[in-house]
Every structure is written in C-alpha cells, then in structure tokens.
C-alpha cells in the first residue's frame, strides 16, 4: 500500500505558536490525510454479516481495497470467499454491514445489473463462453453489451472497437486464436477468453474466483502474468487455493476463515501466521 505523504501545512511562524493553534494545525493535517485515504479506497466492506439458516458464512467481515490494487484472497473451503464476491456483486444481500464502492456508493442498495454497470466485473469458476462462436465473435458480443447477438455480429466495428479487441486479444494471449471456435480452446484459454469478455466491459474492479483451477502449470504461470498486466489499469480481487500462483501474483494477501479476516499482509507474513498454518496451510 502506498504511504500518502502528509502535505506540509502553510509556513509556520517563527514565533512559538499558541498551543491551541498547533493542535488545530495537527487536526487539519490529520483530516487531510484521512480524506486522501478515503479517495484512494475503491472498495470498503464494513462489518458485513450473512447467515444461511443461522450459519454465519460471513461474520463481521471488514476489508479495504485501494484503487489500482490487486488482492489475493485465500482460506479453507467454506471460509466465505465466494460468498464475499456474491455480496460485492449483489448476488447475495448481507444481513448487516455496508459495502462501499468508490467512497460513497453503497453496493448493498443496488442489484446485480446495476453493480455490473457501475464497473464491477466478475468471473465465475467455470468458463461461460459461447462455444459455437469464435474468439473474436465472443469478444464482439461482450463489447456490444446489451445489443442482440445478431446485430452485435453484423455490426461493422468502429476503429476504436477494433483497437480495443486487438488489445484484449493481446492481453489474453489469444491473438493467433481469434478465428478459433471457443469450443476448441483449451480450458485455460477459455478462462482467458472469459476474462477478455469482462475486459470488454471496462470494469474498474475485476473479481476472479479460482481462475487457475484445472489449468496446466504453464497456463497457471501465464495467468499470473496476465492478471498482473490487467492490474496495471484496474483493481483485481483473486480468490485462489494455488499458493504457487498466489506467490507469482506478488500482492497483498488476505486469509479468510469462518467469514472473517484471519490474517492479512505479504504472502510470507500470512503463511508464517500460526493461525493460518493451523486452519489452512498446515492441513
Ligand atoms: N446460498 C447458500 N445457501 C446456504 N449456504 C450457503 C450458500 N452459499 C454459501 N453457503 C455456505 O456458506 C459457507 C461459505 O461458502 P463459500 O462458498 O463462500 O466458501 P468458499 O470460501 O468460497 O469455499 P471454497 O474454497 O470451497 O470455494 C459454506 O459453508 C457454504 O456451504
Ligand atoms: Mg468458493
């Protein structure tokens, strides 16, 4: 996390200031720093709880994601990782707590479609591409948004759309597969195509749930590189069990357990935390 430099205040007088004046200057600077921190926060979960039949899948969960940050979320099965994503994307409404996006947009007051159009894209575990269309057609469909399939594919692309598709093909390592049917891609390539389809919507925050499950080692390593590139221009939250992959991401890690944050920090810090070893890594 980048440390916000504290702006120097107006030039202080040489004469020793009145103690109250000094106090006010300190308060003013503290407030400026707090305002700066709020501006830099993209996503803020505050005391979120969600029960299913009395079982707390998410329990007073608080989490802060900075603008432009990529975060890895780890934790044992049933820790609440997917449920957390369901809550951010509006699929599940929390029982209590708040979820703020870009400072003051309370996501719990919006439905899934509204949250998607606010700029939050979500990749589910299984790839959901159109198998009978080629890579390029899949991307054109996502670029067209709500336009019908027929008009999206017949629509003559503008120079901007063509450039955007080229960029997405390059990012997702699919440039030379653009005319390949999605059905004929490898599992890893289908996952990349789906990530590309999300990029076509230009999300400010991208949520990806277990992207490398079922991938080859080479695809897994490539996915880490690919996500790092994507995170240069937007925020990303990645849920994964594959610790080699999480290490490749090289980002701050949050370990969830029983619906709360158990440990947070660098991967080295989190994986050396005895509580994390006990509930997760040591098994
Ligand atoms: N719609 C639901 N109805 C009932 N229980 C649910 C529902 N969704 C999640 N749960 C329960 O909430 C808990 C958290 O589940 P969740 O899927 O969020 O875990 P996870 O951390 O994603 O686990 P995994 O690593 O296995 O994917 C689990 O006990 C799960 O059974
Ligand atoms: Mg899950």
Image: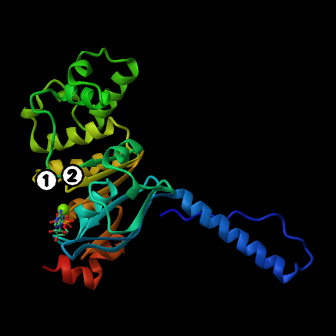
Residue at horizontal 91%, vertical 74%? Answer: 14
Residue at horizontal 22%, vertical 55%? Answer: 209
* Mark 1 vs 2: CB contact within 8 A: yes
Please name whichever residue, 283 or 115, is drawn nearer the observer in this view of the structure. 115
Residue at horizontal 16%, vertical 80%? Answer: 282
Q: Furthest-left residue in view?
A: 184
Image coordinates of residue 44 in percent, x first then y, are: 44, 63
Q: Relative to residue 74, is residue 116 drawn left or right?
A: right
Location of mark 2 (residue): 221
Location of mark 1 (residue): 217
Above or below, comparing residue 227 to residue 279 in the picture = above
Please name whichever residue, 15 or 53, is drawn nearer the observer in this view of the structure. 53
Q: Relative to residue 70, is residue 246 drawn left or right?
A: left
Q: Furthest-right residue in view?
A: 15
C-alpha separation, residue under disc 1 versus residue under disc 2: 6 Å
Q: Relative to residue 147, is residue 29 drawn left or right?
A: right
Above or below, comparing residue 149 to residue 60 in the picture = above
Image coordinates of residue 20 in percent, x first then y, are: 82, 81
Residue at horizontal 21%, vertical 52%? Answer: 221
Q: Quadrant of the C terminus?
A: bottom left
Look at the numbered disc 2 and give the secondary structure of its residue.
helix
Splitting the image into 4 quarters, where does residue 75 fall? bottom left
Look at the numbered disc 1 and give the secondary structure of its residue.
helix
Q: Which quarter is ligand 2 in?
A: bottom left
């Amino acid at each position: 996390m980048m440390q916000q430099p504290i702006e120097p205040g107006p030039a202080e007088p040489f004469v020793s200031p009145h103690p109250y004046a000094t106090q006010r200057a300190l308060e003013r600077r503290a407030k400026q720093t707090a305002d700066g921190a709020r501006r830099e926060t993209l996503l803020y979960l505050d005391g979120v709880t969600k029960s299913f039949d009395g079982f707390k899948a998410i329990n007073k969960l608080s989490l802060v994601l900075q603008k432009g940050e990529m975060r890895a979320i780890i934790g044992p099965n049933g820790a609440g990782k997917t449920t957390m994503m369901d809550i951010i994307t509006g699929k599940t409404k929390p029982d209590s707590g708040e979820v703020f996006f870009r400072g003051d947009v309370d996501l719990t007051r919006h439905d899934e479609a509204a949250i998607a159009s606010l700029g939050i894209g979500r990749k589910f575990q299984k790839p959901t591409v159109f198998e009978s269309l080629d890579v390029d057609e899949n991307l054109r469909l996502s670029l067209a948004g709500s336009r019908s399939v027929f008009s999206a594919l017949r629509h003559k692309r503008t120079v901007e759309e063509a450039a955007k598709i080229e960029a997405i093909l390059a990012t997702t390592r699919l440039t030379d597969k653009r005319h390949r049917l999605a059905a004929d891609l490898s599992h890893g390539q289908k996952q990349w195509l789906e990530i590309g389809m999300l990029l076509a919507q230009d999300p400010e925050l991208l949520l990806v749930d277990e992207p490398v499950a079922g991938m080859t080692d080479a695809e897994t390593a490539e996915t880490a590189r690919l996500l790092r590139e994507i995170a240069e221009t937007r925020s990303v939250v990645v849920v994964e069990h594959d610790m080699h992959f999480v290490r490749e991401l090289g980002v701050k890690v949050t370990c969830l357990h029983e619906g709360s944050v158990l440990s947070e920090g660098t991967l080295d810090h989190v994986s050396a935390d005895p509580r994390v070893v006990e509930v997760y890594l040591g098994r």
